[in-house]
């Protein structure tokens, strides 16, 4: 009996404490716009358990828990210590509409449910919507696809960078972002584009879950839930080597031009553009270039060029080689395979073998020396001819000056007989001999003969006309 009395007294003492250990939930706003936060305060007194142990799984369907903090205070009331606990939750709704904040149970008590109205837009917060797409939609293992997130707003929001957590067995590479304006249903909107290159490494179903995306407007933080995307990956053929790229590749060949020098290394450059390429894969993709009696090959040099933040990447393959003999020779044919996911078969890019010409450096130097020597001989001969012509011109000019300077018929006759065109071929003892020499070299000239006859008549009279 005493035992039951003591138990009853104990129950009477703790019953008021249990009765006051209620869980009270308070929401600072009953109506917000999607993107804005709401603060919920949970408070309790005289609870033996800690509010930190409160399970919030029921909130995750409609809210993102941005921040969670708790505080405990102990005070003396009517000579008895009373402990009060407070938990503050900063929540962002995941969608618009009427959202129910559920009743939460804690230490045998339960809070009352709360109702929150979430508008899609307001005067301060614009309407925002998202579109997540994948191209192509169905993939083959190791095939690269483009994942695009388009964010539509009125252009007043500043969006934060977005990190995409890679799904299991999926390689993710961020691509360049962009922004443009367009008309949507007759309304101008700003489209902010975020993009990634994704490559599934194994077959099966994968889900892309993007984290909450933050934006700022006039210093106010807004947060939005993004759509998720599920895609399927079928296995690549078992016979396909792992270094063969999935998807078409483009190859541009730039062989060396001009005449090459024997035993001097030169580069053959290939530019390869495609998706899912790597330096290790390209090294295995290249056929083995074996030496022969005409060419010696060296290991290829592979480097990525151009913008790395694009879906298709560009690589430069430098193939050094050395010509071992002079003459024309053909470089080997190169075949670079790739797997066509649409056709489901292996295709190839065939690089036609270019023809090169190599020369022996010794014979090349001798030929150059011969050409130089020939040019020197030609220049010397031309200079000699010019000098001889100049001398002849000087002699001819002196003879003409003597003819011009003659003051009487006798001096003119002597000047004509001494006339030298430059080679000494027309000097004569008499005018008739000089006239015969002129006719021999330059043809018969009747006018000149008449002038000579007049000069003879002037000098000697008729008696000397036949001299």
Image (spheres, rainbow, N blue to C red):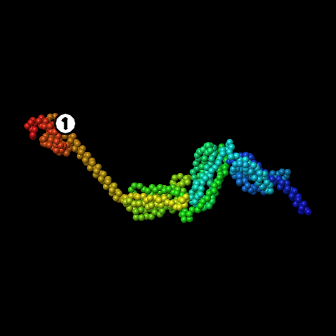
Residue 71 visible? The answer is no
User: Measured from the top left, where is residue 243 in percent x and y?
Assistant: 53, 62
Pick the residue in front: 50 or 181: 181
Residue sitting farthest toward the right: 1
Residue 236 visible? The answer is yes
Q: Quadrant of the N terminus?
A: bottom right
Give the left or right position of residue 233, taking residue 92 as reference: left
User: Measured from the top left, where is residue 19 in percent x and y?
Assistant: 83, 54
Which residue shows up at 89% across the image and 62% down it?
Answer: 3
Which residue position is annotated with label 1? 404
Which residue shows up at 21% across the image and 41% down it?
Answer: 396
On screen, residue 234 above or below 86: below
Which residue shows up at 77% across the image and 54% down it?
Answer: 104
Secondary structure state at the residue bearing disc 1: helix
On screen, residue 36 above or below 237: above
Neighbour class for label 1 at 10 Å: few (<14), some, many (≥20)? Answer: few
Q: Which quadrant of the structure image shows residue 172? A: bottom right
Give the left or right position of residue 142, taking residue 350 as reference: right
User: Measured from the top left, where is residue 327 in percent x and y?
Assistant: 37, 60
Q: Quadrant of the C terminus?
A: top left
Residue sitting farthest toward the front: 343
User: Measured from the top left, where is residue 13 in percent x and y?
Assistant: 86, 56
Count of labels in the image? 1
Pick the residue in front: 132 or 35: 132
Give the left or right position of residue 153, taking residue 339 as reference: right
Give the left or right position of residue 360, taking residue 140 as reference: left
Which residue shows up at 51% across the image and 62% down it?
Answer: 284
């Amino acid at each position: 009996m005493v035992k039951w009395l003591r138990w009853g007294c104990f129950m009477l003492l703790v019953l008021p404490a249990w009765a006051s250990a209620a869980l009270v939930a308070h929401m600072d706003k009953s109506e917000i716009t999607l993107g804005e936060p709401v603060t919920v305060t949970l408070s309790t007194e005289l609870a033996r358990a800690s509010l930190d142990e409160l399970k919030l799984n029921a909130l995750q369907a409609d809210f993102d828990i941005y921040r969670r903090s708790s505080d405990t205070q102990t005070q003396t009331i009517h000579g008895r210590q009373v402990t009060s606990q407070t938990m503050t939750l900063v929540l962002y709704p995941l969608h618009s509409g009427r959202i129910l904040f559920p009743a939460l149970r804690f230490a045998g008590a339960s809070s009352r449910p709360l109702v929150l109205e979430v508008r899609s837009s307001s005067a301060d917060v614009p309407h925002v919507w998202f579109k997540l797409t994948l191209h192509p939609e169905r993939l083959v293992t190791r095939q690269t696809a483009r994942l695009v997130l388009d964010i539509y707003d009125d252009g007043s929001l500043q969006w934060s960078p977005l990190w995409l957590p890679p799904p299991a067995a999926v390689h993710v590479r961020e691509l360049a972002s962009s922004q443009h304006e367009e008309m949507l249903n007759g309304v101008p909107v700003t489209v902010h584009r975020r993009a990634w290159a994704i490559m599934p490494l194994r077959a099966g179903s994968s889900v892309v879950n993007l984290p909450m995306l933050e934006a700022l407007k006039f210093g106010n933080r807004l947060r939005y839930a993004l759509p998720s995307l599920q895609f399927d990956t079928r296995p690549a053929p078992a016979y396909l080597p792992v270094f063969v790229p999935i998807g078409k590749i483009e190859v541009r060949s730039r062989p060396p031009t001009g005449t090459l020098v024997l035993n001097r290394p030169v580069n053959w450059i290939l530019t390869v553009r495609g998706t899912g390429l790597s330096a290790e894969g390209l090294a295995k993709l290249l056929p083995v270039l074996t030496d022969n009696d005409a060419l010696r090959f060296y290991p290829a040099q592979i480097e990525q060029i151009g913008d790395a933040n694009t879906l298709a990447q560009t690589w430069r393959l430098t193939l050094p080689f050395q010509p071992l003999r002079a003459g024309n020779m053909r470089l080997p044919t190169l075949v670079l395979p790739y797997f066509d996911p649409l056709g489901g078969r292996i295709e190839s890019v065939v690089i036609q073998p270019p023809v090169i010409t190599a020369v022996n450096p010794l014979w090349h130097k001798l030929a150059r020396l011969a050409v130089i020597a020939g040019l020197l001989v030609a220049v010397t001969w031309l200079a000699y001819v010019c000098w001889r012509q100049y001398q002849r011109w000087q002699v001819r000019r002196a003879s003409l000056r003597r003819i011009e300077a003659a003051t009487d018929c006798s001096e003119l006759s002597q000047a004509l007989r001494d006339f030298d065109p430059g080679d000494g071929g027309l000097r004569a003892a008499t005018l008739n001999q000089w006239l015969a020499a002129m006719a021999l070299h330059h043809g018969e000239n009747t006018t000149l003969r008449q002038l000579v006859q007049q000069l003879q008549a002037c000098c000697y009279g008729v008696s000397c006309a036949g001299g």
